[in-house]
Amino acid sequence: MTSRSHRASKSLRHSKEGVTGLQILQSTVKWHHMEHVATSLYDAYSDILTHQAMILAVNSSFVDPLLQFESQLKIIELSFKMVFAMPSIDKVKEMRDNEDDKDDLENLYQNILNIFEDTLLILVSKDLYKLQILKEMAVWMSEDSSYLQERAMVIISRVLSFACGKVRRYESFDIPCLGILAAELFLLCFHTDPSIIQQASSGMYHLLCIAKYQDADIAKNKTTKYDKSGSHCLLPFPCGIELPPKISQQEKTKIAQDVGQSLMPSMLTDLVWSLLMRLSASDYTTASEAATLLKLTLEYHAHKVTMMSKIVDAIYKQLCGNPSHIMKQAMLQVIALLTLASPKKVIFQLMDYPVPADNTLILMWHTAGSVSSVAPHVLKTILLILKGKPGEMHDNLMERRRFSIDVTNMMPVAASQALCTLLPVGSYKKAVAQFFPQLLMALLCQLFYSSNQKLMTGDGPLYAQDALRVLLNCSGLQQVDTALEKQNCWTQFSQELFDHSGVHLVAKTLSEYNFPQFPETLHYLYKLSVEGPRRSEDSVITVIFLTQLLNNFFKNPFPEEFLILFRNWVKDSNPTVSELSLQKIAHLAPVINEIENVCSLLTSILDAFLSKDKTVTIQALLTVRKLLDKLDKVTYSSLCTRIASSYCPLMDHSNGEIRSMAIQHFGELLRDMSQYTWMLNDVILRVLVPLILFLEDTETKVVKACKYTLEICASELGWSKPYSLTEENYNFELLVINICNSLRLSHGRYIRDLISDTLGFLKSSRAHLRRTSVILIGYLAKLCGHLLHRDEIEVMLEAVDRMLRDEDPVIKELAKITHSIFKEIADRFTTSNLKQSFRRLFNFICVKKLKPLYNYNGPNNLTVSPMGIKETKNDKESLMDENYKDILGKKFPRASKCTSEKE
């Protein structure tokens, strides 16, 4: 018993000693920790004072404002991490038993916080731009939850309250950071700590007041808006009202509505951007809360958001990073809300990615397409994009409105691929029906462009073809799609030889199946034709498509409205459009007399004679001739002079086919209007010179046309037929003599005009024209030399002098003879006036027949000698006219009375 008691007492004594030792140890550790805390507080106090001095020194310097702000921000960041890494004030109080020590440490602690706050207040008082520091503080808090968030929020709230009072005294100011700071405070308003919620809500209240003042429109009336209380402020949670720890969904919605309403578009955009960036936060709670607030804000205020392209692109990049399912849905919901608010901006950005689109982009297309209420706006935007040409280079990057940096426009290809996704969507059915004509024509143009591009590059999918087929199937035209497939229509688009035959086939097949969209399509094509497509290639497709529809649904002639279109297209800058229009007008020949304003129609075609494109000119000539064959004589006669005059410039065209057609058609017009010759005499004499000169043309068809027309001209002018034209080989010089003699007898007063016309051909680049013009002007001068004035002779001599230096030796020899003729005429002016008057009178009374002067043999002449006429008896007899049997000179001396007297 004694032994047991002894052991017990011994154990008790040892236990008491152990407790005392532990207490001593704990007390010692606490004291050391307390000393460490006190030391750290003193050090912090010392550092914060130093930092404040440095910040204020920089603030008073003349350093560049941006560099000043950056340097101050670095110092403040050091101060922030030092101040808010301190233990809480409650823990500091627990470390001291002595009340005096507690008060000292508490005062020291509070002084540190006050110095930090005062520093911020001083900076903000000098420059409201420094409120950006608060935004950075909020970001630092979100990055490290170990900081004293509640204390930091108190300071942020106080600084905002101070700034709110200060801005009332400013007429205008700019604080660019409010949106981002609002996003941070917005998230903190739904924190789990009630004290942080209270401070965040207070800070948000002051921030929104500042935002209201910053709005330029409200600033003008800010005294009436904010100096009064309550209802005028329209802010979500007035200062001093505590938010409940658990906020309901309805309250969140109301707060989001009010916040979005208070912020200007630029601030709201920053808020949305910041919340969007928080979706990828590692903290799931923060990301989830950001997603909720983002959804609520955009539901009511997405229309105020700017920089949508940047936001959409950021979402695309985040989705490519394979986020969680919940975050993916949140981002897609943002796309849907933005599409609902501004479909044009969103769709433009969604079309501005590389083609073919990846799965992420197609998912975003599906999301945008799920917003059925904006389906018409989406299709309108896509149609706007489809007006572009794939692969087209942008010369001026400043003129581009696109977000990407790609200078080649591949957006139309992306838009075509997107239509393959959007058109089958059930909610788009009504919109597709509404825009069927626009989609049809846009995709036909894109298919044509894409096919040409594929021919050049050899690769690339034809999304326009796929989209066109989807459009047909979605519009109840499955039979049309099947028929086109059987006819290898899509293959024809890809073959260069077929050109526009694919477009023709689509229009023809649609017509054959009486597609129900015909009225709307015809109306749209008419509107498009009146307004004019952006590109000439589009005009070609429009003309082909419209022509085919009119051929199938209307009998000739077309309604006047459409006939006006074809008349206007004759003058189109695209030669293909002009040619197609002229071809269609030519088909109207059988009903030409049923058309109103046929004169206007023919006049527009005559204007096309002067087109720079030879195919247009040729088609215009053919069209006019075809219409004239059916035109009634009364209308024909009213236009014959205008039409005949239009042929004149073409007789000297550089293209041989056009020359021959103009000359031939002129002759046919004279034949048609034989009863109205008196109306055309002046025009006939105007074209006489080119008809003569082009008899020596290098192209056989031109020579034949000249012969044909000259025979008709001779008949209409009452001349004896220049029968040598019927010979396969004829002598040009003798023919000229024949015509000149006829002119002298019947139209002598026009000879001076003919000389003037011939002078123009002396400058021709074609040698045969220079040769023939030298000969013709010589004979014309021989006929009317007595009528010419001295100054006229000088001009002609100067022109012929240039021909003496021609590079062609034949022309030189011919020019010598012509020069001698003019020289002889010029010498007559040296005689007395009496002799000159007598000579003129003699020439008027006596008709002098011309004789060969040049002995010229051209390529179409009787003989092959270049400078001599090898005549035979039979040849001479065949070339003599009964009125001019002495035309070959002395070998056949059967001269007239005047000729004999002169000899």
Image: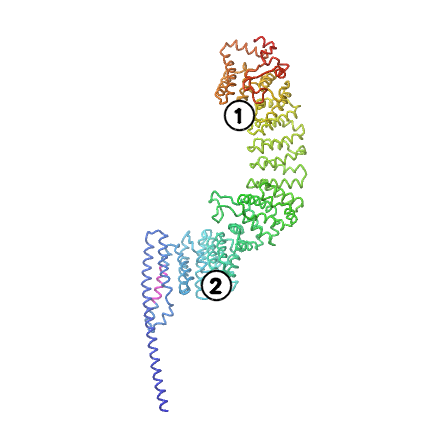
Return the mark for residue 766. 1
Task: Pick whichever, 74 or 850, lies toward us.
Answer: 850
* Among the two numbered marks 2 and 1 on one chain, the one whose residue lies closer to the N terminus: 2
Q: Residues within 10 Å of mark 2 (few under 14, many from 20)?
A: few
What main secondary structure does the magenta stretch of the protein show?
helix
Image-quadrant location for residue 866: top right
At 63% from the left edge and 40% from the top edge, which residue is drawn?
A: 547
Residue 115 in magenta stretch:
yes
User: Mark 2 is on which residue type?
Assistant: Tyr
Residue 21: x, y in percent?
A: 33, 79
Number of numbered discs overlaid on the protein picture:
2
Q: Is residue 470 left or right of residue 256?
A: right
Residue 798 in magenta stretch:
no
At 33% from the left edge and 54% from the top edge, which residue is drawn?
A: 60
Which residue bears the numbered disc 2? 284
Q: Which residues are magenta?
A: 107-119
Q: How is the image coloured?
A: rainbow
Residue placed furthest toward the bottom:
1
Asked if 820 appears above or below 96 in the picture, the reply is: above
Q: Is residue 46 left or right of residue 624?
A: left
Residue 871: x, y in percent?
A: 59, 16
User: Mark 1 is on which residue type?
Assistant: Arg
Residue 726: x, y in percent?
A: 63, 21
